[in-house]
């Protein structure tokens, strides 16, 4: 990309979830026209786009139209069909590149890429045979190579016998077996890289997961400057090695006072949602800037500290939550994604809170979520 793509050009989006919704909101605010290709007619991004192509991701006619009408196409999830990305690239610019997405959507390819790049990962082995007995050590976590997210496609196993049984339960598909590490905490870094190699990194987030789903993110992470700088440096190394264009999230484990790369997300990330309210440039505008070849935005925080809590469909068990309660005090922000059906474990929205210290923001965010379920 030698010339920036400026408004009112058209930006295409493959996928229609909440990440796409916020990216298209940023694009439209900046003056771009937007198109989304997503099979769900009620997808959150569909109501934001100028045009919603309701079709499967491999629909040839829909891909032709998306490619022909867009100056650049991006994706909001890590599992778009490779054939779809290749078809789009024959017609227009695609960012991030299909090769980078291919690494992040397959755990085997991802682990091998990280090892080849000399980056720290947990001991692992590939499992694709019923008689496998990898020597990674137990307990371990068996993960499907593809299509696993938010804790799906994973099993904790105590020995080789449990591992083989779990492999069959997961469909006898290629898997990665990782040694279960003793974690001190979990971190994530959201970085942006432009086509010219320019970088912008957000403050490191400290994350807590429940049942494999991100529950809480606190910024800045309370791990000290040395670990934060190391995590950012590794994330930048990964983006460079992938020749990445766009926003990339890198998740880390903190183990024995150092960081280990867990996985990559080739898109804006749940742990970066706080940027909508407490950053000079949010991660979604940054995505648009990066894929369009514009100058990257300021990533500094507008408050000393922030915390974000996810709102899952479980909150609707007793009826519609008390949304007004989440906004008491004027130091929280509520975001709902426009999804029609609330289901247990489904991400329906989030609350961001801010304060003078990370601990203050954390308490405020957790209290706001707890208040949503109070009835009468």
Image (cartoon, rainbow, N blue to C red):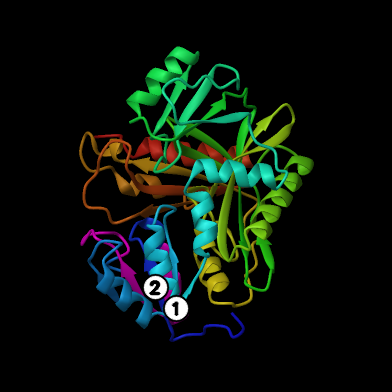
| Residue 273 visible, this orientation | no
Q: Toward the viewer: 163 or 313? A: 163
Q: Toward the viewer: 310 or 23? A: 23
Q: Toward the viewer: 367 or 72? A: 72
Where residue 358 sits in the image (x, y, percent)?
A: 62, 41
In terms of secondary structure, where does tag 1 sit? loop
Where residue 50 sits in the image (x, y, percent)?
A: 30, 77
Residue drawn at x 63%, y 76% as measured from the top left: 295
Q: Residues within 10 Å of mark 2 (few under 14, many from 20)?
A: many
Assess whether residue 220 is covered by the magenta stretch: no
Q: Which residue is mark 2?
A: 12
Q: CA distance from mark 1 to mark 2?
A: 10 Å
Q: What mark, if any, has residue 204 been given in the picture? A: none
Does residue 221 appear to the left or right of 22 in the view shown?
right
Q: Which residues are magenta?
A: 22-45
Q: Which residue is mark 1?
A: 92
Using the image, determine if residue 47 lies above or below residue 132: below
Q: Looking at the rendering, which quadrant does residue 110 occupy?
A: top right
Residue drawn at x 53%, y 60% as measured from the top left: 99
Assess whether residue 37 is covered by the magenta stretch: yes
Confirm or deny contact between disc 1 and disc 2 (CB under 8 A).
yes
| Residue 78 visible, this orientation | yes
In terms of secondary structure, where does tag 2 sit? strand
Where residue 115 sits in the image (x, y, percent)?
A: 67, 41
Q: Toward the viewer: 154 or 25? A: 154
User: In front of the other: label 1 or label 2?
Assistant: 1
């Amino acid at each position: 990309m030698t010339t920036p793509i400026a408004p009112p050009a058209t930006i295409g989006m493959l996928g229609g979830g909440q990440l796409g919704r916020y990216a298209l909101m940023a694009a439209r605010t900046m003056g771009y026209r937007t198109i989304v290709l997503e099979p769900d007619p009620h997808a959150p991004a569909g109501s934001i786009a100028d045009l919603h192509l309701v079709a499967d991701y491999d629909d040839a006619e829909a891909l032709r139209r998306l490619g022909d009408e867009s100056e650049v196409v991006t994706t909001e999830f890590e599992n778009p069909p490779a054939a779809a990305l290749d078809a789009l690239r024959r017609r227009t610019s695609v960012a991030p590149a299909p090769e980078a997405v291919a690494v992040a959507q397959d755990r085997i390819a991802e682990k091998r890429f990280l090892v080849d790049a000399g980056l720290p990962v947990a001991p692992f082995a590939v499992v694709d045979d019923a008689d496998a007995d990898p020597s990674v050590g137990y307990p371990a976590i068996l993960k499907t190579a593809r299509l696993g997210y938010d804790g799906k496609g994973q099993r904790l196993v105590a020995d080789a016998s449990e591992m083989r049984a779990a492999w069959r339960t997961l469909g006898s598909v290629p898997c990665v077996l990782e040694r279960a590490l003793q974690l001190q905490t979990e971190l994530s870094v959201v970085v942006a890289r432009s086509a010219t190699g320019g970088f912008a990194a957000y403050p490191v987030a400290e994350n807590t997961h429940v049942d494999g789903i991100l529950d809480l993110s606190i910024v800045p992470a309370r791990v000290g400057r040395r670990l934060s700088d190391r995590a950012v440096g590794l994330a930048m190394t990964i983006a460079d090695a992938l020749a990445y264009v766009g926003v990339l999230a890198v998740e880390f484990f903190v183990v024995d006072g150092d960081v280990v790369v867990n996985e990559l997300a080739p898109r804006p990330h749940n742990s970066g949602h706080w940027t909508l309210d407490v950053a000079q440039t949010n991660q979604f505008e940054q995505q648009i800037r990066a894929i369009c070849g514009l100058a990257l935005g300021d990533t500094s925080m507008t408050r000393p500290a922030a915390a974000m809590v996810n709102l899952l469909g479980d909150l609707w068990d007793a009826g519609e939550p008390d949304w007004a309660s989440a906004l008491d005090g004027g130091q929280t922000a509520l975001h709902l994604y426009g999804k029609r059906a609330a289901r247990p474990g489904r991400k329906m929205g989030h609350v961001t809170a801010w304060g003078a210290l990370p601990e203050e923001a954390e308490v405020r965010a957790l209290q706001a979520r707890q208040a949503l379920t109070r009835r009468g």
